[in-house]
Image (cartoon, coloured by chain):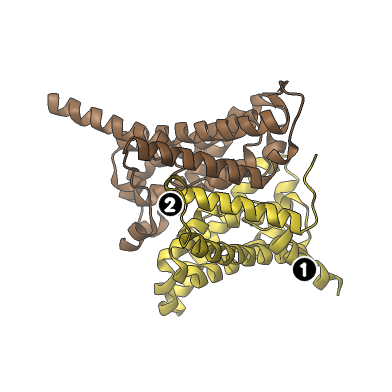
Chain colours: A yellow, B brown
Amino acid sequence: MTILLSFFGAALTALFLENIVFARALGTSWLLYMLKHPKELVRYSVLLTIITVVASLIVYPLRDFITGTGYAYVLMPILFIVCMSAMYALIYFVTKRFWPEVFENIRKRLASATFNCAILGSLLIPYNEGMDLARTLGYSLGMSVGFVFAVVLIGAGMERIALCRVPKAFRGLPVLLIYLGLLSLAFYGLIGHQLPT
Amino acid sequence: MKKMNAATVSLMNDSFRKILFSNPVLVGGMVVGEIIIGATSLQNAIALSITFAIVTIPVLLLAPLIAYFVPKTWRILCYALVSMSMLFTAQAAVAPISPTIFDSLGIYLPLLALNTVVVAYSRLISEEKGVVFNLLDGICFSLGFLIVAVLIGGIRELFGSGTLWGYEILQRKASALKLPFSGFLIAGFLAAAVEGLRIVFHAKPYEHFSGGKEDQK
């Protein structure tokens, strides 16, 4: 029961309190891409979730070997990238061998979905915060679902902004960044923070 | 000779136009997260810029070579490993800036190893270009990143902490400027300023990587 509570607690924290986009600003470049290609959101988010959760599971027992060396700050990101590369190779070969149709669907997006800041961040944050396995997995799941949540929320907002008369200089990326800033402020207030004085 | 000079001048003009009108952060929307969260002070901004340059330029330079020898599927692994190995050098280079630099930047320094220029731009654009073009690209992207990071970091440190490079300048401060939403808002207004200048000067934006282009491949 405690493990389940830790899992869901970490997942909800990553989803709302420390949303990958609004609080951490990770994966913003891919968010811009997803807004231009909404049809790919489901495919991309499923890939992102699988890679994040499985990579966290693989990385968790290996972290202890690096922690004791005294060079964790330098070596840990390398370990994570090696694990991400292994995930990339694993998914590539398994889908190509056993599910050729799935492979054709994900082939173009596999590299982008595997090697991005969102996944590296979702491996680095639980390590930095000293989370146990249940919380690490919950956090990773929450981060990937939080990314999809952010894309859907921003996509809906941008549709409304597209109907407004936005000044020429603010069209496109500027208004999106300002909208992201306002949503980030809203989330900051929503979870009970007060602005520092 | 004249033709060659004209071509070189055109290449230089085209490359240096990228610093402002095709800024990787404010126009391309690349490497936004690291600046929004990491650039809360001038020291952080400089550390991020040095790391970005050290990590990105070698990848762009090696991209044509890697593309020649390595099959398309596995090139991304090479780019990630090259940038990750350069992270050692970058960490050694930024360490003298401040004893607390790694603590204040946290995960955002290692995250630069997988920035969008390394992961996407190198695969979509740099592989097909020559070494000179990629070198100029890397320098311009790094300068563009430096300008944005210094502006955002400077504004947030000056008005958020009342200091500049650690020296006290202002008595009053608005600490909220150090929060992520302020980074988004300042970046948004800077992006609008660049777009406004681009409209005034009738400059065409540089063709950054796009999903459409990736789909064609």
Query: Pointer 2: what residue?
Result: B120
Q: CA distance from mark 2 to mark 1?
A: 33 Å
Chain on which label 1 sits: A
A143 relative to B169, above or below: below
Are the residues tagged 2 and 1 within 8 Å (C-beta)?
no
Q: Amino acid at mark 2?
A: Ala
Residue A118 image offset from top left, x and y in percent: 59, 56
The secondary structure type at the circle numbered 2 is helix
- Nearest the viewer among A106 and B191 is B191
Image point (49%, 64%), residue name: A159
Q: Residues at marks 2 and 1, common chain?
A: no
Image point (51%, 64%), residue name: A160
Q: Which mark is residue B159?
A: none
B89 relative to A182, above or below: above
Q: Amino acid at mark 1?
A: Phe
Apparent side of residue A168 relative to residue A155 in the rendered image (left or right): left
Residue A158 image offset from top left, x and y in percent: 51, 61
Apparent side of residue B28 relative to residue B166 in the rendered image (left or right): left
Query: Pointer 1: what residue?
Result: A7
Q: Is residue B28 visible?
A: yes
